[in-house]
Amino acid sequence: MMRIAVDTNVLVYAHGGNDPVRQRLALDVLDALAGHCVLVPVQVLGELFNVLTRKARWPKEQARDVVLSTHDNLPTIETSFSMLVAAVDLCVVHGFSTWDAVVLSAAAEADCRLLLSEDMHDGFVWRGMTIVNPFAAERHPLLQQALVQSG
């Protein structure tokens, strides 16, 4: 069983983030990965609430319900100080934004093999974890392997 972390954009699309095609793709990938350990960094839940209330203009109560439901259905990865220090190093050495680096660091610390994200460095490998865009026209071999193993 592969450990897989998901980034904010995957969850936003899964909840109908104004793109029906990507919504279907996000839901299909998440459903297909049900046999794996799919994790959500706590940072992602904060970003999810922010995107739903600010960009998608959802009522705060509805966005809160999505955050709580996501937490109920997927294990979360707490952020520690050592993860923050690693994230800062990712910013300095590899040019990641602060909050993307926190997500990446948390996922790596949780021994995830994949981090599904549309807007990070697709194909970037760090500490044995690979960032993969689940919406790419051509599926990354690791994501394809995970999908086949689940099926």
Image (tube, rainbow, N blue to C red):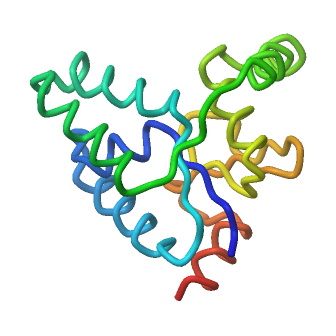
Q: Where residue 13 sits: x, y (%)?
A: 32, 46
**Which is more toward the observer, 3 or 24?**
3
- Give how far across and how far down residue 142 sits, in percent: 73, 67
Asked if 91 appears above or below 148 in the picture, the reply is above
Q: Is residue 15 above or below residue 29?
A: above
Q: Left or right: where does residue 14 sit relative to residue 96?
A: left
Q: Quadrant of the N terminus?
A: bottom right
In the displayed structure, 68 sits above or below 50; it is below
Q: Is residue 107 left or right of residue 135?
A: right
Horizontal side, residue 25 vs residue 138: left or right: left
In the rendered image, residue 108, in percent from the top left (x then y), is placed at 77, 43
Between 150 and 77, the one nearer to me in the picture: 77
- Image point (69%, 42%), residue name: 107
The structure residue drawn at horizontal position 37% and vertical position 57%, both measured from the top left corner, is: 73
Front residue of 98/17: it is: 98
Furthest-bottom residue in this view:
151
Residue 135 on image: x %, y %: 49, 54
Q: At 56% from the left edge and 83% from the top edge, which residue is drawn?
A: 150
Residue in the picture at 77% in, 52% down? 111
Question: Number of numbered discs present?
Answer: 0
Choose top left, top right, bottom left or bottom right for residue 25: bottom left
